[in-house]
Amino acid sequence: MRRFHFNLEKVLEWRKYREGETEIELGRAIAALTIIQNSLKENAAKHNQAAEERFAQTNIRDIQYYDLYVRRLESEKEKLLAEAARAALVIEEKRAVYLEASRDRKVLDKLREKREKEYRKTMLAGETKELDDIASLGLARNRAEK
């Protein structure tokens, strides 16, 4: 039996490659958001610790330093929240690109499967016909010899 050949195999391979690349980009975007979220958690922990230590101070200068530190942490928190919002938008964009690439690849995969199924059906029918012909010829020879 002749081997199946899909004419759009190169296109399918390219679409698989593109899907993989977009998946990697999506992963990087998600990793960036995770880093920002971890920074926010760390910032919150520092904020809580600084607030506790501020109330333990008796010196006015130390209290002022802790107040300034807490304000700086709050400012960082606002910046991190803005970065997180931007990162979430980037993730949505990357996800849309990935879904489109995935959909394109799946379309060709399904077409390939359909064509392969048709090919196998045609080849099986052809082989069956050939075997029937061979069997008929053998039967005819046996009858002719008798």
Image (cartoon, rainbow, N blue to C red):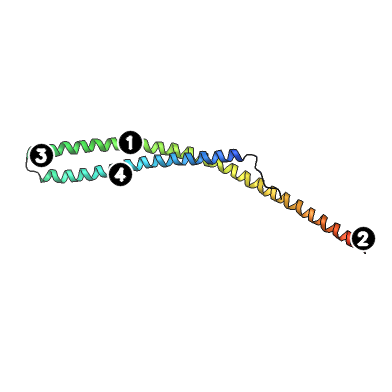
Residue 95 locus on image (x, y percent): 45, 40
For mark 2, what is the residue? 144
Q: Is residue 100 visible?
A: no
How far apart marks 1 and 2 lie (CA) works out to 90 Å
Tell me which numbered mark, 1 or 4, is placed earlier along the sequence: 4
* Location of the C terminus (image quadrant): bottom right
Q: Amino acid at mark 1?
A: Glu
> Which of these two is toward me, 89 or 24?
24
Q: Quadrant of residue 145?
A: bottom right
Q: Residues within 10 Å of mark 4 (few under 14, many from 20)?
A: few
- Please give the label number shown on residue 49: none
For mark 1, what is the residue? 83
How far apart marks 3 and 2 lie (CA) works out to 116 Å
Locate residue 118 relative to residue 85 in the image: left or right: right
Instruction: Tell me which residue sits at (59%, 44%) in the image.
Output: 109
Q: Mark 3 or 2, which is nearer the eye?
A: 2
Q: Do labels 4 and 3 touch, CB within 8 Å? A: no
Tell me which numbered mark, 4 or 2, is placed earlier along the sequence: 4
Residue 26 locus on image (x, y percent): 43, 40
Locate residue 52 relative to residue 1 in the image: left or right: left
Q: Do labels 1 and 4 touch, CB within 8 Å? A: no
How far apart marks 4 and 3 lie (CA) works out to 28 Å
For mark 3, what is the residue? 62
Residue 99 locus on image (x, y percent): 50, 41
Q: Secondary structure at mark 2?
A: helix
Q: Secondary structure at mark 3?
A: helix
Q: Quadrant of residue 10?
A: top right
Tell me which numbered mark, 1 or 2, is placed earlier along the sequence: 1
- Please give the label number shown on residue 38: 4
Instruction: Tell me which residue sits at (81%, 56%) in the image.
Output: 132
